[in-house]
Amino acid sequence: MDQRKAPIFDMLKQYHMEQYASFHVPGHKFGLDLNKEERYYFEHIMQIDYTEITGLDDLHDPQTIIKEALELAADCFGSEQSYFLINGSTVGNLALILSVCGRDDIIILQRNVHKSIINGLILAEAKAVFLPPNIDPQTGLDLGVSINHLEKALAQYPEAKAVLLTNPNYYGIGMRLRRFVDLVHKYHIPVLIDEAHGAHYGFHPKLPDSSLSCGADAVVQSTHKMLTSMTMSGMLHVQGNRIDRERLGRFLTMLQSSSPSYPLMASLDISRRWMNTKGRENIINVKSTILTFKKEMEMLQWFEIVDIGKDYGEDYTQDPFKILIHDLTETLSGYDLQKSLEKRGCMIEMADPKFILIVCSVSTKKDDINRLLKALKDLSVQFNLKKKELSKNITNISNEMAFPDLSLPVKLENHFENTKVVKLDEALNLRSAEMIIPYPPGIPLLYQGEIITQEAIYKIEQYINSGAHFQGSKEIINHQISILN
């Protein structure tokens, strides 16, 4: 196929050039009544903000330009069928789970999944069998799951409808998937991959393999995260016959807006085209810049860049575009580093009690990397001058709590009634009525309906004391938690 084409974007340009009179939604009429300041920021994007009028096709029944754009996406990413997501990877995860699971069905998945997957289980009224994570003892980082735990789960629960894995995780750490996929397929069930942070995988030999190339049946990608489309845009890719595509399509139609954003779809269209025409060259350039940055960082005595792939290369991978940095002296927490860099004009992706996460992409520029390097060098000098004045709240907690080897099937439900709020240190052995989610990265520490253990209380307290932000609870920052009454 001609990957130089961008059918949605090209048609939107054509319609804009025709300058016809608009008697259809949206009501802003291409931004005609914006004031000067508003026009500066919004005018151009509003000029291509169309709806499903004649000639512009329909995302929920694609026949022309959207159909062609989806076929180009499938060809580009190596799937048999691709879908555009205009509600982010979240809607892809929800639709996938609902398409393979019904009430009381079992799905095997990692413990440390994104909250959208948990919400999908709640909507499906399915049961989760959680696989415990493997933790790197040096960094406390989650490496993924072991093939032995997965094999044990499949043998114990042969009625499972699917296996869902996250690869890579927020920190850029992933598993070598081929053997996991081969194992699951022996049980004739699909492998679903949340590849939100890996849309760039497979576009260069120096990057990890894509999930599709490893044989996964369905893969959800946040195209906006690591590629070049707009925020909230993503793709879902399917191959093989283990996924009921008609059922999946129905759930996507149900969950996505009936008025999908044409600017978002066009951004997916041109992102795919850009990756085929310029992306591979940019990957080489950005990787070279990052390598130079890492060499310069070796000269700074206070900081260390974590490279999981160096120690676990045979089993796990590290995304070279994700840079994990921490203070070797344990003077600064990740949150302290984040605030210090922001004061120097560098906005980072996220921080946790120990690390900061630097996210580069195929569009990262050398000047920005150099600015980050200068800021870190400035901090290195400041450490010498003001070491005693800096925060010492660094904690050595891992990315996960201690869990049993294999959980019993857990049915997760929303609880809106018969709950009460108690002090966190009084919640031991009670059942949580809410999810406790430090954000980023948006991975639940505690699920609703789950027993609150001493390990859970300890870790939540550590996050609170380190200055983390939480989603899913209004009171947790005050050391209180909602429990089932």
Image (cartoon, rainbow, N blue to C red):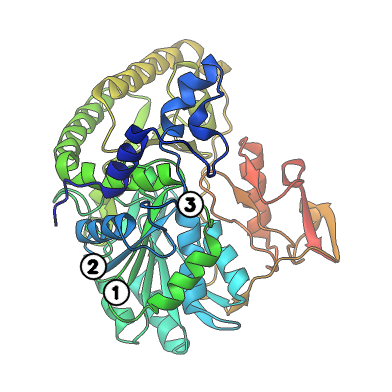
State the mark number for residue 181: 1
Q: Indicate the secondary structure of the residue bearing disc 2.
A: loop
Q: Indicate the secondary structure of the residue bearing disc 1.
A: helix
What separation in Å lies between label 2 and label 3 (alpha carbons)? 31 Å
Q: What residue lies at 68% left-to-right and 63% top-to-bottom?
A: 453
Q: Which residue is mark 2?
A: 214
What separation in Å lies between label 3 and label 1 (alpha carbons)? 33 Å
The spot of residue 70 in percent (x, y) is 30, 59
Frontmost residue, 246 versus 34? 34
Frontmost residue, 189 versus 224? 224
Q: Which residue is mark 3?
A: 260
Frontmost residue, 234 versus 12? 12
Which quarter of the rendered picture does the N terminus lie within?
A: bottom left
- Could you tell me the amino acid type at mark 2? Cys
Frontmost residue, 81 versus 476? 81
Marks 2,1: beta carbons within 8 A: yes
